Amino acid sequence: MAEYVGTSAVNGRETVKGQYALPLAVAIGLGFGAVGLHARTTTPPVYLVVEIDEITDANGFEALRQTADATAVEVQFEDGRYFARTEKVTALDGSAPKFFALIAFDSMTRAKAFNDSMKNNTALRAKVTKSRSFIVDGTSHWH
């Protein structure tokens, strides 16, 4: 059987032998990492989705595109993360939107705060496109 405890030559106290120190530290670190990961994933994310099906005013849509950098700043301000923001959407069933955005937030409060901060963009988008936006509750467990 392996010997886990030894006597230090310096102060006579029992210590973990050097050959076991690194594996023990790694095991403890992995344990704390798993606890931290579990704590971060217990609250499911919330997703804000924007789908644009048709552009009804090309000039207006170009003006909307010019707000993309400011929108990205607002996403970051609310601790959001873009998972997708693209015009490259492939239809599998039905028709694909012309534009799709998927933004993850840590809470419904943050997603709604972002949406509230974008009222002017939302009004412009509604004026120059046929589109919709909505919020979806995520899941913390993958099945």
Image (cartoon, rainbow, N blue to C red):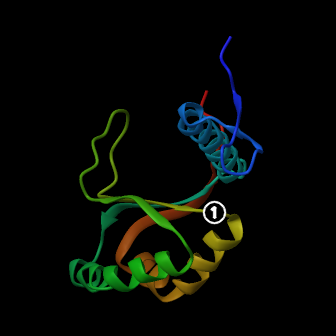
The amino acid type found where label 1 is placed reads: Asp
Q: Nearer the viewer, residue 2 or 40?
A: 2
Q: Nearer the viewer, residue 110 or 26?
A: 26
Tell which residue pokes out farthest to the top in this image.
1
Q: In the image, what residue occupies the spot 27% across and 85% down? A: 66
Q: Is residue 74 left or right of residue 107?
A: left
Q: Is residue 93 left or right of residue 86?
A: right
- Residue 51 position, x and y percent, is 42, 59
Q: Is residue 82 above or below residue 94?
A: below
Quadrant containing the C terminus in the rendered view: top right
Count neighbours of disc 1 (C-alpha within 10 A) and say few if under 14, some if 14 to 19, many if 20 or more: some
The number of callouts visible is 1
- Residue 131 position, x and y percent, is 43, 65
Badge 1 is on which residue? 106
- Tell me the quarter of the picture where residue 113 sits: bottom right
- Residue 122 position, x and y percent, is 48, 79
- Tell me the quarter of the picture where residue 72 sits: bottom left
Q: In the image, what residue occupies the spot 48% across and 83% down? A: 123
- Tell me the quarter of the picture where residue 47 sits: bottom right
Q: Is residue 72 left or right of residue 20?
A: left
Q: Is residue 133 left or right of residue 97?
A: right
Q: Secondary structure at mark 1?
A: loop
Q: In the image, what residue occupies the spot 47% across and 64% down? A: 81
- Residue 114 position, x and y percent, is 57, 77
Quadrant containing the N terminus in the rendered view: top right
Q: Nearer the viewer, residue 79 or 19?
A: 19
Q: Is residue 82 above or below residue 42?
A: below
